Amino acid sequence: MRQFSDINPLTIAQDPRVVATIQDDRNEHKTYYFLIDHDYMLISNATYFTNKRTGESKWLHYQIEFPKQGLVWFLDSMQHRFFKTEAEGGLPKGVFHDKTVINGERIKLSRDFNADGNRGGGYSFITLDRKEDTYFAKEYSFTDQFLFNGGLIEILQDIADKIQRGEL
């Protein structure tokens, strides 16, 4: 499993691996970056944070990495497993996640029921073999609002289409 250094939030906007960006729909100071590095995809964000109590500001960042074919799988699973009933070939009743192995890495897509903190739905992209620390898997959760009304799904689909055509 290929390892990646943390992105630099001060220079990521100029990184030649960046193939797309989008501003978060709930935090104007947070930008998501989508990078392709050979056979891998990185999703990262950089957030300019100001501590209200101290007035100090700094850049915060987070990232996940997975085989780039994982993005194609995430979108396919969402469309063909989550958006369909069990009778149509979707997930069985009461199951809210899907898992697979791509290039030796376990990845998971999970339905979220509180993605926005107000019981709003969403989806989590999870890399089960890559850990934040020694225990928790790296993941990103995106709200339904951001995915389907905020333009994120179109960006992800565009990247996946380019991956499938061999352009990325």
Image (cartoon, rainbow, N blue to C red):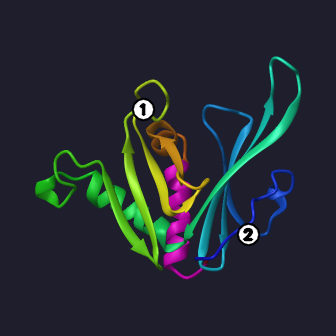
Q: Position of residue 63 (x, y in %)?
A: 65, 55
In x, y percent, where is residue 150? Answer: 54, 41
Above or below, 144 against 138 in this view is above
Q: Can residue 45 be seen in this view?
A: no
Secondary element at image label 2? loop
Highlighted magenta segment, given as a residue range:
152-167
Where is mark 1, residue-wise?
A: 114
Q: Is residue 160 magenta?
A: yes
Q: Are marks 2 and 1 in contact (CB under 8 Å)?
A: no
Q: In which quarter of the image is the N terminus?
A: bottom right
User: Where is mark 2, residue-wise?
Assistant: 17
Q: Residue at x 15, y 58 (%)?
A: 88
Residue at x 51%, y 68% (from the top left corner): 160
- Does 159 sit left or right of 19 as displayed? left
Q: Look at label 1 and name its amino acid.
A: Asn
Spatial separation of the CA atoms under disc 2 and disc 1: 32 Å
Going from the N terminus, do you reach mark 2 or mark 1 first? 2
Mark 1 neighbour density, 10 Å: few (under 14) some (14–19) many (20 or more)? some
The residue that appears at 17% across and 53% down in the rendered structure is 92
Residue 142, above or below 156:
above
Q: In which quarter of the image is the C terminus?
A: bottom right
